[in-house]
Image (cartoon, grey):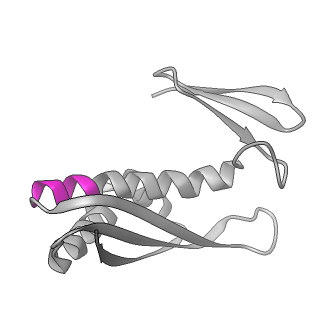
Amino acid sequence: MKAKVTWQDGIAFLGESESGHKVLLDGENPGKAPSPMEMVLMSVASCSAVDVVSILEKARQTVHDVIVEVEADRAETVPRVFTAIHLNFVVKGVDVAEKHVERAVKLSADKYCSVAKMLEASVKLSHSFEIHAS
């Protein structure tokens, strides 16, 4: 896997994946685009969401929406690494069983989400979920 970033202006960069997808990143606060640290949060959330949706579909759950709300704590001093990340999965659907959502979130956290597995060596990761009828 390969990627590159190209300086745009200020401290903004255009990232491009090997597959040709592009995303703007900005180190300013606030900037023109997400910061690299915000992208890490969105990466762990989307990685886990992919797993949860896939597992719930295989369990034949009628899911209409999955939202992952992410909160993180950072160290006070440089480097301001994440010290804790909490992911709350909001699952909307019809008659979605709690046991299936709990299992999907656990499998993602413990086995499948490569971003979470990479982060867990240095960050305290926690998870919760809610189910809403839609």
Front one among 78 and 113? 113
Front one among 42 and 119? 42
In the image, taking residue 104 as reference, residue 1 lies left or right, namely right
Specify the quadrant that holds the C terminus: bottom left
Does 128 appear in magenta?
no
| Quarter residue 64 falls in | bottom left
Q: Main structural element of the magenta stretch: helix, strand or loop?
A: helix
Can residue 38 be seen from the camera position used here? yes
Q: Residue 61, position in %: x, y?
A: 14, 63
What residue range appears in magenta?
53-59
Reply above or below: 102 against 63.
below
Does 54 appear in magenta?
yes
- Could you tell me which residue is drawn at 44 percent across and 64 percent down? 68
Q: Residue 31, position in %: x, y?
A: 81, 47
Reply above or below: 79 against 76.
above
In the image, taking residue 62 as reference, residue 119 lies left or right, namely right
Specify the quadrant that holds the N terminus: top left
In the image, taking residue 118 as reference, residue 42 lies left or right, namely right
Q: How many marks?
A: 0
- Could you tell me which residue is drawn at 38 percent across and 70 percent down? 90
